[in-house]
């Protein structure tokens, strides 16, 4: 089994599998400019436009900052440009400083200060040229699977992720952890109904307590905004696909993390360790926001299982699509990377499919482009702190 | 996770599971061999859906992945389709609780 790949060594010591220059807007007001700057620069430039406003409550702002800093620090990013409109609460210079602590070249740009959109686009392009030159200095060197942090995500479920794609990806996670790497899955609402199984797998009482606390909090938050997860899950689409209860859905969902002990659970967009084994992240069930959380945590690659199909990608991390549904493999061939449908058709065991997933991850780490990358599918969204959740936090 | 394929038609994910998952659209009356016994489907079972391997009385737990995924709300015969019409979550049904409160 292959374990080596060639990546980009960063000053932080972490290894990237891509060498992007990230263009990070501090709010929705600078998102369009960020997109414009990146669009004309070249395939290496990647913008992360998002919907957050210029003024956010403290808790929400802290989360937005953590995501943007985390994405800037992701080892797939060789250099970054932080773009502000100029009226935001978030301080672009502060974000740039936090990203630059890793020794990464970072610059800032203020749309208001430089004189508007046209000037910002021009200045931005000049800045990106020099940042790209700096990023190109990164050492391109051989690395081991133990340096990979792989995030695992699920979207568009039917019965096949639970019986084929998720167990196959779980097998690949077991291989990665055995090789000394880090695997991380998330989507806390999908732990509900299987949290007792995960809790038993935690390495210590502290991790177990944190895990159950996060599950309880996600459920309470959903309740607060009028969603009863236990009543609303599985969704009508899931039910049509054959999922009957939330337990059935969750048991299938957690199989994508494999069978190794749960070594920790981190908050949304918090740093994931290198060489950490299986570490969960507390994220919402919405796949785009969840993927962004793990990429902000340092995941270089995302493995994404889907039954009914998905086109989701990410600006800085390659997203590897694995489907266990032979029909989806045929119908959405151009968006899929690994066919675990062979398991459903009886042509491969879970272990054989798992080896294919692991091999694909190593090939993608080595530079092979995923379907989502080829087609520039680059969704980016930051999870919001709901107003009622804020009120609750503040005891109002 | 170890799976066991029955007759090329259905998948049993763990020993002791009381349901099998259809690996294709299976027709009513189809016979599915499971070792020494044969289960005859009492309903059409669509791809990805489940049918009972054993007769299950009402209120019996339903097992898949070697874990409890719910319980029957009516008696289910072997070969019958198992889904939301005859199986519910054991871990709280928020929609039902809300109905009762009203």
Image: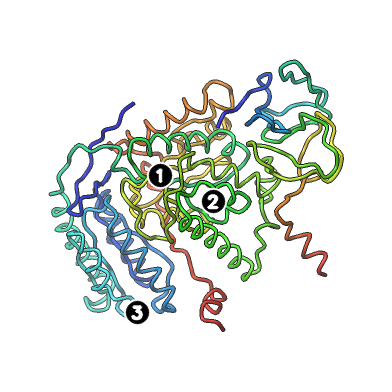
Instruction: Look at mark 3 in the image and give the residue it sits on.
Output: A89
Residue A319 is labelled as 1
Where's residue A85, x and y in %? 31, 75
Can marks 2 and 1 be said to lie on one chain?
Answer: yes
What color scheme is it?
rainbow
Badge 1: few (under 14), some or many (20 or more) residues near its Cα, within 10 Å? many
Residue A12 is labelled as none
Where, by quadrant of the figure, is residue A113 drawn? bottom left
Structural distance between the alpha carbons of marks 2 and 1: 28 Å
Give the residue drawn at x 37%, y 53%. A295
Q: Secondary structure at mark 3?
A: loop
Q: Could you tell whether A342 is left or right of A242 in the image?
A: left
Q: Secondary structure at mark 2?
A: helix
- Residue A301 to residue A389: above or below: above
Structural distance between the alpha carbons of marks 1 and 3: 32 Å
Q: Chain of mark 1?
A: A
Q: Earlier in the sequence, mark 2 or mark 1?
A: 2
Q: Earlier in the sequence, mark 1 or mark 3?
A: 3
Dot in front, 2 or 1: 2
Q: Earlier in the sequence, mark 3 or mark 2?
A: 3
Quarter of the image with the N terminus of chain A is top left
Where's residue A335, x and y in %? 46, 39
Give the residue drawn at x 17%, y 39%. A141
Can marks 1 and 3 be said to lie on one chain?
Answer: yes
Q: Chain of mark 3?
A: A
Dot in front, 3 or 2: 2
Q: Chain of mark 2?
A: A
Badge 2: few (under 14), some or many (20 or more) residues near its Cα, within 10 Å? some
Quarter of the image with the C terminus of chain A is bottom right
Instruction: Look at mark 2 in the image and give the residue it sits on.
Output: A199
């Amino acid at each position: 089994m292959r374990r080596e790949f060639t990546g980009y060594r960063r000053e932080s010591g972490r290894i990237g599998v891509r060498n992007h220059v990230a263009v990070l807007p501090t709010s929705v007001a600078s998102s369009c400019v960020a997109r414009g700057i990146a669009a004309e620069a070249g395939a290496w430039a990647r913008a992360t436009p998002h919907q957050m406003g210029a003024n956010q409550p403290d808790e929400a702002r802290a989360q937005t900052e953590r995501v943007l800093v985390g994405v800037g620090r992701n080892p797939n990013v060789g250099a970054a440009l932080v773009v502000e409109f100029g009226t935001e609460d978030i301080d672009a210079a502060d974000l740039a400083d936090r990203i630059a602590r890793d020794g990464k070249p970072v610059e800032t740009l203020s749309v208001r200060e430089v004189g508007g959109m046209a000037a910002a686009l021009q200045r931005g392009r000049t800045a990106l040229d020099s940042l790209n030159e700096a990023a190109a200095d990164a050492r391109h060197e051989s690395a081991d699977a133990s340096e990979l942090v792989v995030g695992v995500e699920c979207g568009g479920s039917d019965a096949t992720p639970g019986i084929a794609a998720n167990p196959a990806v779980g097998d690949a996670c077991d291989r990665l952890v055995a090789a000394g790497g880090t695997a991380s899955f998330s989507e806390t609402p999908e732990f509900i109904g299987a949290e007792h199984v995960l809790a038993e797998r935690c390495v210590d009482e502290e991790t177990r307590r944190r895990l159950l606390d996060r599950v309880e909090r996600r459920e309470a938050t959903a309740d607060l905004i009028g969603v009863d997860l236990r009543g609303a899950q599985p969704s009508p689409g899931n039910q049509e696909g054959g999922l009957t209860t939330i337990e059935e859905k969750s048991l299938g969902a957690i199989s994508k993390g494999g069978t190794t002990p749960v070594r920790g659970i981190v908050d949304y967009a918090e740093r994931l360790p290198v060489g950490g084994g299986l570490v969960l992240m507390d994220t919402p069930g919405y796949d785009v926001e969840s993927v962004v959380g793990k990429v902000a945590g340092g995941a270089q690659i995302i493995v994404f299982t889907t039954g009914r199909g998905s086109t989701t990608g990410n600006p800085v991390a390659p997203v590897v699509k694995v489907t266990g549904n032979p029909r989806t493999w045929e119908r959405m061939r151009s968006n899929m990377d690994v066919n675990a449908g062979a398991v459903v058709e009886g042509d491969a065991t879970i272990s054989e499919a798992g080896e294919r997933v692991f091999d694909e991850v190593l090939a993608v780490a080595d530079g092979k482009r995923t379907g989502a990358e080829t087609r520039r599918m680059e969704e980016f969204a930051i999870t919001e702190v709901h107003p009622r959740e804020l009120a609750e936090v503040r005891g109002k | 996770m170890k799976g066991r394929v029955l007759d090329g038609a259905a998948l049993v994910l763990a020993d002791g599971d009381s349901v099998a998952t259809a690996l294709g659209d299976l027709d009513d009356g189809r016979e599915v061999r499971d070792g020494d016994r044969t289960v005859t489907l009492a309903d059409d079972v669509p791809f990805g859906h489940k049918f009972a391997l054993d007769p299950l009385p009402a209120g019996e737990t339903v097992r898949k992945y070697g874990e409890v995924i719910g319980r029957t709300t009516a008696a289910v015969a072997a070969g019958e389709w198992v889904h939301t019409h005859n199986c519910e979550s054991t871990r709280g049904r928020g929609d039902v609780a809300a109905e009762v409160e009203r």
